[in-house]
Structure formats: structure tokens, C-alpha cells
Amino acid sequence: MALFSRLLDAFSRLVVIAAGVALVGLVVMMGWMVFGRYVLNDTPTWIERAATLSILCIALPVAAIGVRERFHLSVLGFREALPIGIQRWISVACDALVGLFGVAMVVWGWQLVEMVGPFKIPLLAISQGWTYAPMVLCGGLIALFSVEHVLKDITRPEGPEQRGAAAAFLE
């Protein structure tokens, strides 16, 4: 379990680093759009569509990291008012449901990718499927991270985990 968690820690960091690089690319694109519009008087039309795609590629995988690190929206008051043994099984059930949601994102997101794959995004000349590919990635990450949470919840002797490993990474 420790090796699995360390591998996911490294993978999570890579996703965050890739999102940071993509965010820098998004800022550069926006800068180019402003420069083109106000200095060159020729707005690059492809940037708006590319920026939308970039935002999806940044936000969705980072949202999956939020599931792993448990900094997503969560209401813990009810669970924490229960005895430790019951808390564990409620936590297992919640993590399993989140994992099933991730699997649903993969399955139905992939169907969207296949359905719109033959069509091109007009200003970018790439497949429309790239619009939905980040959802498939996000769902896969959520499912993977939920498996880790379920395994931790089952094997942890003192009850459900309260915080993710991001606390050390973000502090």
C-alpha cells in the first residue's frame, strides 16, 4: 500500500506540474491575443478556442488531484459525529461512490470522444474529441485515487483519513 501511495504521490505531482506548465501556456496565449488585438490590430482567432481547451486540460485533472488530496467540497459533520467503526464504512462507501462516478466519466466521456472524433474544431483543425478527452482523464484519475482511498480506509486502524498528502506539498 505504501508503494502504491508513493507512486500516486509522484503521479499527482506530475499532473500538478503539467497543469502549471499549461497555465503558463494559457497566459502566453492570452498575452499574444492582447498583443495581436491592440498592437498588430489583427486578433488571432484561434486563441479563444485553444484557451477554452487549455482550461479544460488544466481544471479537470487538477480537480481529480483535489479528490485525492481531499481538498474538494466535503461535509464531514455527520460522519465525524458517529463512532469510529461506522465512520470507516461511511468513508469507504463515499470513496467507492466517488470512484464509480469517475468510472462513469471515463465510460461516457469516451463515448463522447468517439462520437465527435471525426469532426474538426474549426479554428484549430484538430478533432472535436480533444474537448472531451480531459473528462476521460479526470474520470480515470478519480477512479484510481478512489481505489487508493478505499484501500486506506479499510486498512487504517484508527478510522478514516481526514486530510490528503497535499497539505505537506502545499505548505
Image (tube, helix red, strand yellow):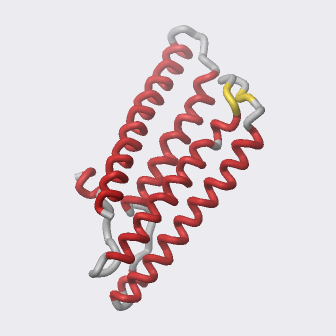
Locate residue 140 relative to residue 154 in the image: left or right.
right
The residue at the far top in this view is: 40
Quarter where residue 80 is shown: bottom left
Specify the quadrant that holds the N terminus: bottom left
Vertical position of residue 88 compared to residue 83: above or below: above
Residue drawn 32% across the image and 80% down it: 159
Vertical position of residue 25 compared to residue 142: above or below: above
The residue at the far bottom in this view is: 83
Q: Which is nearer the eye, 54 or 5?
A: 5
Q: Which is nearer the eye, 56 or 152?
A: 152
How many labels sit on residues?
A: 0
Q: Position of residue 8 (x, y in %)?
A: 37, 53
Residue drawn 41% across the image and 64% down it: 148
Q: Where is residue 64 in the image (x, y as percent from the top left)?
A: 47, 54
Vertical position of residue 113 compared to residue 169: above or below: above
Locate residue 74 relative to residue 9 in the image: left or right.
right
Q: Which is nearer the eye, 51 or 88?
A: 88
Residue drawn 60% across the image and 16% down it: 43
Residue drawn 41% across the image and 37% down it: 18
Q: Position of residue 17 (x, y in %)?
A: 36, 38
Q: Which is nearer the eye, 108 or 124?
A: 108
Q: Position of residue 138 (x, y in %)?
A: 53, 50
